[in-house]
Amino acid sequence: MKHGFAYLSQNRFLSIPPTADGSARPFGIAGIPYDGAVTNRPGARFAPSSIRTASQMLCDGIHPFFNVSPFDYVHDVGDIATPNTDLSAMRAVLGQYIPDLLKQHHMVWLGGDHSVTLGLLRAYRAHFGVPLAVLHFDAHCDTWTDHFGEPSGHGTWVYEAIQEGLVDAGSFVQVGIRSAGDQAAREYVAEQGGAIFTARDLRGLVSEGQLADVIQTIRARLSAKGLPVYLSFDIDCLDPAFAPGTGTPEVAGLSTNQVFTLLEATADLNWVGMGWIALKSRRRMTTPNSPAMPQRKLFGRICLDKCVNI
């Protein structure tokens, strides 16, 4: 007997009903319910469903800042049924599905642990034919050369992406880094020519004026070479006070205000995709705030893109 995949979402973002021809809608959302490469707490496989559930509270669908609605422009394609534990097999499955989706939509990906991002970047690199510029929000540098003796994991994808030429190292910016780690890993992106803003660097800086120098640097790095820009957002960049539901929480993190300020100030760049990672959604480990943050930012991201590109 062949069993169905247990963790596929049964709901849709904003409760948008399925359409007969989803390709007519420019924005796509897909879940990747995989957490087989986590170091600490599992549960990110439930995140795509939880984010969609939280989005149902956006009842009116009109963004309060951009004053538009993405309702008629979004196609939720559901979740990609990946293997539960085999990392290579998971990435192989992504390689089968992603190319067609990139041809049809500006995609938003709901992870899943951060190991899925390497498979996504491989597909984006092949699709555009050039390396990507990346804005990476995270508490962890994800530049380790191995995953506790294994060649790849959720903490190696940045190192692998740079080594494989999937991203342009000089156009790679990390924000919120603060976890323990050896110096070579923590400084790897900077040594390759990229930029790092640690959580300590950003302490006390919240408003757009206070963050002006940071914003200027991020914008310059991501736009200097005219490359397509990808956003990878690990929810543990936030302090656990704002989002405790994550696999590897780290204290002294960013606030939601800081994150929204940075993202809104860079919203007009050449974005081609984004991924929300490491939301650990199980009742005993999370609060309503954890899935609320990604659903609100996804809402804002799509609304902004609608204003700029439609």
Image (cartoon, rainbow, N blue to C red):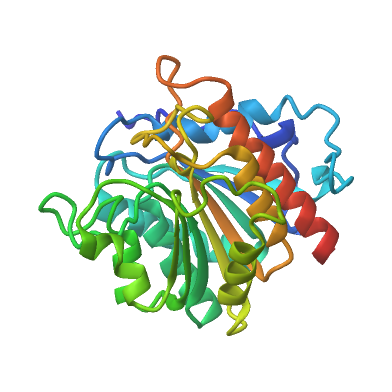
139 vs 137, left or right, is: left
> Residue at point 17% right, 59% down?
151
Quarter of the image containing the C terminus? bottom right
Q: Picture coordinates of residue 286 (x, y %)?
A: 46, 22
Asked where in the image residue 53 lies, by quadrant, the reply is top right
129 vs 93, left or right, is: right
> Residue at point 39% right, 78% down?
193
Asked if residue 93 shows in the view, the reply is yes
Asked if residue 21 shows in the view, the reply is no
Closest to the observer, 35 or 276 = 276
Quarter of the image containing the N terminus? top left
Closest to the observer, 264 or 51 = 264
Asked where in the image residue 306 lies, by quadrant, the reply is bottom right
Q: Picture coordinates of residue 159 (x, y %)?
A: 30, 66
Q: Picture coordinates of residue 131 (x, y %)?
A: 47, 78
100 vs 115, left or right, is: right
Closest to the observer, 296 or 12 = 296
Q: Picture coordinates of residue 97 (x, y %)?
A: 48, 58
In the picture as drawn, the residue positioned furthest to the top comes out as 284
In the picture as drawn, the residue positioned furthest to the right comes out as 67
In the picture as drawn, the residue positioned furthest to the left comes out as 149
Q: Is residue 160 above or below residue 242?
A: below
Closest to the observer, 34 or 288 = 288
Count the marks: 0
> Residue at point 68% right, 31% down?
55
158 vs 268, left or right, is: left
Q: Is residue 289 above or below residue 250?
A: above
Q: Is residue 54 above or below residue 140?
A: above
